[in-house]
C-alpha cells in the first residue's frame, strides 16, 4: 500500500488522523473481520511516524472495539458479533456453524473437585460432593469467544474425562456414558469484568465485559447432568434467549 500523507500542522493530532484512516479501511473491509493489520513497523513506515504515535492510534481503535491486540501475535480486526442462541437444546458447534463460522475448541483444565454452592445446587448434590470439571475455550474461526466450565456428577460419569479426551466433544462423551440427548432446564445471564486468567485465555482487554451464562442441563428423565458456567466476550457474542 502506498504511503499515506498526513495533514501535518492542521491542528488534528497525527495519531487521530492515523486512527481515522485505519478505521475507514476497516469499515471498507480492506482489512476483513478476523484479519491481521500490518505490523507496527510497517504502519509506522507507511504513515511516516514514530512507533509511539502509531501505538496511540492503534490503542484508540482497540478502545472502540474495532481491533484486538494479541501480545506476540499482532493486531487483529474484530469479527462481526455472533448471535449465540440459548434455548432448550443449546450446542456450541451448531450455534457457531449457523453463523457461517468454523467452530473449534481446546481443553484448558480438567479434574475432580468438591462442588461449591452454585455447582451443588445446580446438580442437586450436597455441597462438597465430587464433581468432574471440563474447562474449555470455545472459538469461532480460531478467535476465542467463550470460556466454559462444565461440571458433572463424578459418581454418574466416572470416565467422562477420558471419553472427552478421545472424542473432543461433550455431547459424544455423554453419549458414551448413556446420555443420548439432553436439554437446557435453566439459564441465568449476568455480566462482569474479566479476571486475569480470563483475559489471557480469551485474548481480550481487561476493560471489556464478559457475559456470564450459568445453566443447568438435564437428561431424558429430567435429572440434572451438567452445571455450566460460560464466560462470553461481550463485544464478540450476543446472547439470544429463546423459550425453554
Image (tube, rainbow, N blue to C red):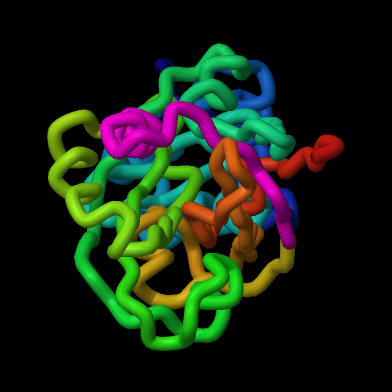
x, y (%) of residue 177?
30, 38
Residue name at image x 63 percent, y 65 percent: 209
Instruction: Give the residues drawn in magenta, as a range.
Output: 169-188
In the image, residue 114 sits, relative to residue 14, either above or below, namely below
In-front residue for pair 31/239: 239
* Quarter placement of the C terminus: top right
Residue name at image x 74 percent, y 56 percent: 11
Q: Is residue 17 visible?
A: no
x, y (%) of residue 118?
56, 78
x, y (%) of residue 53?
46, 58
As drawn, which residue projects farthest toward the top? Answer: 100
Instruction: Let me know if residue 173 is in the magenta part.
Output: yes
Q: How many marks?
A: 0
In-front residue for pair 97/113: 113
Instruction: Let me know if residue 199 is in the magenta part.
Output: no
Q: Write down the quadrant of residue 74 in the picture.
A: top left
x, y (%) of residue 128?
38, 87
* Quarter placement of the N terminus: top left
As drawn, which residue projects farthest toward the front? Answer: 221
In-front residue for pair 111/51: 111
In the image, residue 211 sits, relative to residue 137, either above or below, namely below
Residue name at image x 24 percent, y 33 percent: 168
Left or right of 233: which side holds 191? right
In the image, residue 117 sits, relative to residue 120, either above or below, namely below
In-front residue for pair 113/50: 113
Residue name at image x 51 percent, y 33 percent: 92
Q: Is residue 74 visible?
A: yes
Amino acid at each position: 500500500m502506498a504511503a499515506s500523507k498526513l495533514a501535518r500542522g492542521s491542528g488534528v493530532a497525527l495519531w487521530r488522523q492515523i486512527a481515522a484512516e485505519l478505521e475507514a479501511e476497516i469499515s471498507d473491509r480492506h482489512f476483513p473481520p478476523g484479519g491481521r493489520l500490518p505490523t507496527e513497523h510497517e504502519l509506522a513506515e507507511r504513515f511516516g511516524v514514530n512507533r509511539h504515535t502509531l501505538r496511540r492510534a492503534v490503542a484508540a481503535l482497540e478502545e472502540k472495539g474495532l481491533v484486538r491486540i494479541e501480545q506476540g501475535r499482532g493486531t487483529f480486526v474484530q469479527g462481526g458479533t455472533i448471535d449465540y442462541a440459548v434455548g432448550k437444546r443449546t450446542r456450541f458447534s451448531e450455534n457457531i456453524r449457523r453463523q457461517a463460522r468454523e467452530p473449534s475448541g481446546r481443553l484448558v483444565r480438567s479434574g475432580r473437585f468438591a462442588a461449591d454452592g452454585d455447582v451443588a445446587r445446580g446438580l442437586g448434590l450436597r455441597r462438597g460432593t465430587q464433581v468432574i470439571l471440563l474447562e474449555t475455550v470455545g472459538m469461532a474461526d480460531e478467535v476465542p469467544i467463550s470460556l466454559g466450565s462444565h461440571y458433572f456428577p463424578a459418581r454418574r460419569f466416572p470416565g467422562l474425562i477420558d471419553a472427552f479426551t478421545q472424542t473432543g466433544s461433550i455431547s459424544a462423551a455423554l453419549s458414551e456414558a448413556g446420555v443420548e440427548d439432553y436439554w437446557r432446564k435453566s439459564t441465568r445471564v449476568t455480566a462482569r469484568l474479566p479476571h486475569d486468567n480470563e483475559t489471557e485465555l480469551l485474548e481480550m482487554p481487561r476493560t471489556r465485559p464478559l457475559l456470564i451464562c450459568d445453566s443447568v442441563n438435564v437428561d431424558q428423565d429430567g435429572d440434572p447432568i451438567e452445571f455450566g458456567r460460560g464466560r462470553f466476550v461481550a463485544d464478540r457474542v450476543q446472547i439470544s434467549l429463546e423459550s425453554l
